[in-house]
Structure formats: C-alpha cells, structure tokens
Image: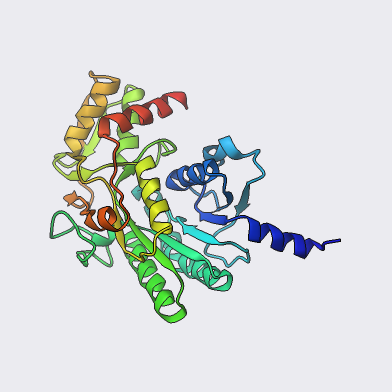
Amino acid sequence: MRSAIDLTEVILRRFVINLVTGGAGFIGSNLINKLMEAGEDVLCLDDFSTGDRSNLQKWLKSSRLKIIEHDVSNPIELQVHKIWHLACPASIVYYQKDPIKTSRTCFLGTNNMLDLAKKCNSKFLLASTSEVYGDPECHPQAESYNGSINPIGLRSCYGEGKRIAESLSFDYFRVHNIPIRIARIFNTYGPHMSPYDGRVISNFIYQSLNNKPITIYGDGTQMRSFCYVDDLVDGLVQLMNSEHTGPINLGNPTEEYSILELAKIISKKINPKTKIVKLSLPKGDPRERKPLIDLASSLLDWNPSTTIHQGLEKTIQFYKNL
C-alpha cells in the first residue's frame, strides 16, 4: 500500500503543476483559464488585495485548480514545476495606494519565488512591464533600451520595483542556473479587468456605460499601443515553453492610438453622446509607449492578431455582463 508521500510523488511526476502568483488578477486569471483549458493543473497564489475570486468562477469546482490565499512577500513551501510570477498590482491606482507594499512585492515576492524555483528546479517566468522604460527617449522601445526612469518618482515603486525584480532574476540565473523567462508587458486590456483600477480602457468603458463623462488626463495626445489579453497570454505561454530568457517585449505595436482617439472609439461603440472631460496630467505620465516586438516575432513566432475593435467588443460585452 502506497504512503501519502508516495502518492504525492506519483501525482507530481504525472502532472505539470503550474504555480500562478497573482492568479486571481486580470492577466493571471486569463492565464489560468488558458492553462486549465489545456488540461493542466494549477495552483493559484493570491492575497486578494487586488485580485478577485470571481475571476476564477469557471474553475472553482475543478479538482485541477487549487487556490492558496497568501502574500508572496512571505516565503512558502510548495512543489511545482513552472512558476508564473504575476503577483503585483499593475494599475497606477492600485500600486500607488500602498507603494511600500508594491516595492516589497516586487523585491521580496520575486526573491521568494526564485528561491522556490531553486528548491523545486522549476522554470520561472517573471511578468515585468513596459514601465521599466520609464518616459522613453526613443520610440518605439526595444529590449536593448535601458530606459529613462525617475527612481524617486510617484511611479517608481512599480517601475523600479520591476527593474530590481528583473535584476534579481538574472542574478539567480547567473549564480544558480535557474531557467528564467522575462516578459516585458505593454498595455493590455480585456475581460477580468477591474472597472475601478484606473486603467485607461476600463475607465473609459465603465464611464461610458454608466452615462458619466469620459475623463482623460492632459490634452489626450499621449500615445499608447494596446494588446488584447488573449494575445498576451499566448505570448507568455510561448515564452515559458521556449529556451529564451528574455527580456522579451510583449505588446501590440500595430494598435497604437492617442488617448483622445481611444476615448472617441469607445464612446462611439457605447454612447456617442458621452462627453469627454480633460483633467490635469499626473506627474511622470509617459508621453508615448510602444513596443518593438522583433524578438518575440523571430524567437517565439508570436504576433498579436486581435484588432482594437475586436478586442473592445469582447471587453465591452464583459462589462455589460457584470
């Protein structure tokens, strides 16, 4: 008769167990949806400070999904094969709400997950961000660009936090030979975005659906490129399954719009009578942000395919169903 330990070892050998930190968040829940649909087993680690259990509603009764409420700033002992490290508030409203916690999550959380990867001999993927480029002096941004960032600005808890997370990941790779993957994620949108998190698309949709004026900051000429979340998740999966450490930009350079253009597109789809109100521009807001994705295209054979109109239709429908 097998012992409990023997049975656990059999299970671990049989299944690829994915640990997704921040799995109840926007991108994390969409990633879990992709992994579960592929028949894989998933551990979702989330402290639910910004994530929402309802994002995982589809899988809550599945035996292949286990949810652990835990703050990654504290160590944890698990046995996993792949670590997808997405835990960190990514919207400016959330990461500025408690900037010290954001910095701790970026550094201590990443350190703890890298330690776990070392113990388990796991693959490790860090969800980094285009914020590491700061307010860029070149356009578009390639991975070779080192960025222009204010280390003591209001956004630095996130931007500098992700920069040290990248640095730490590469040190674990160089010192301990941990198989790391680093994705620099550009503006992403889609279902499971919180309507209250301050991201530009969620803000505009929520305001227009509720017959409120759409608020833009500054004159609205800031340029952004937008990637639909399904495309982004495909890129994360392809990066994890590749042999490339990165960093690799993941975003949609073909879908670039000014903030004002985006507001008009969304209001036209929902309520053409929606007013657009301009507010003062927050300090540190970058003028433009757009990825070069040559590396992702050549090394991962990845290119986003969802147009802004296709993605917005799906996203708007998601909000209508809330």
**Vertical placement of residue 30 versus 83, above or below:** above
What residue do we see at 37% from left, 37% from top?
190
Nearer-the-camera pick, 105 or 9? 9
- Its colouring scheme is rainbow
**Vertical placement of residue 320 versus 67, above or below:** above
Q: Residue reaching furthest bottom?
A: 175
Residue 15 place in picture, x, y as percent: 62, 55
Taking the image as drawn, is residue 293 in sight? yes
Horizontally, residue 237 falls left or right of residue 32, namely left
Nearer-the-camera pick, 304 or 114? 304
Horizontally, residue 125 falls left or right of residue 146, namely right
Residue 93 place in picture, x, y as percent: 37, 47
Nearer-the-camera pick, 57 or 42? 42
Q: How many marks?
A: 0
Place residue 262 in its image quadrant: top left
What residue do we see at 18% from left, 39% from top?
257
Residue 1 place in picture, x, y as percent: 86, 61
Place residue 173 in its image quadrant: bottom left
Nearer-the-camera pick, 126 or 159? 126
Q: Residue reaching furthest right?
A: 1
Residue 91 place in picture, x, y as percent: 36, 48
What residue do we see at 36% from left, 67% from top?
166
Horizontally, residue 273 falls left or right of residue 116, namely left
Taking the image as drawn, is residue 155 in sight? no
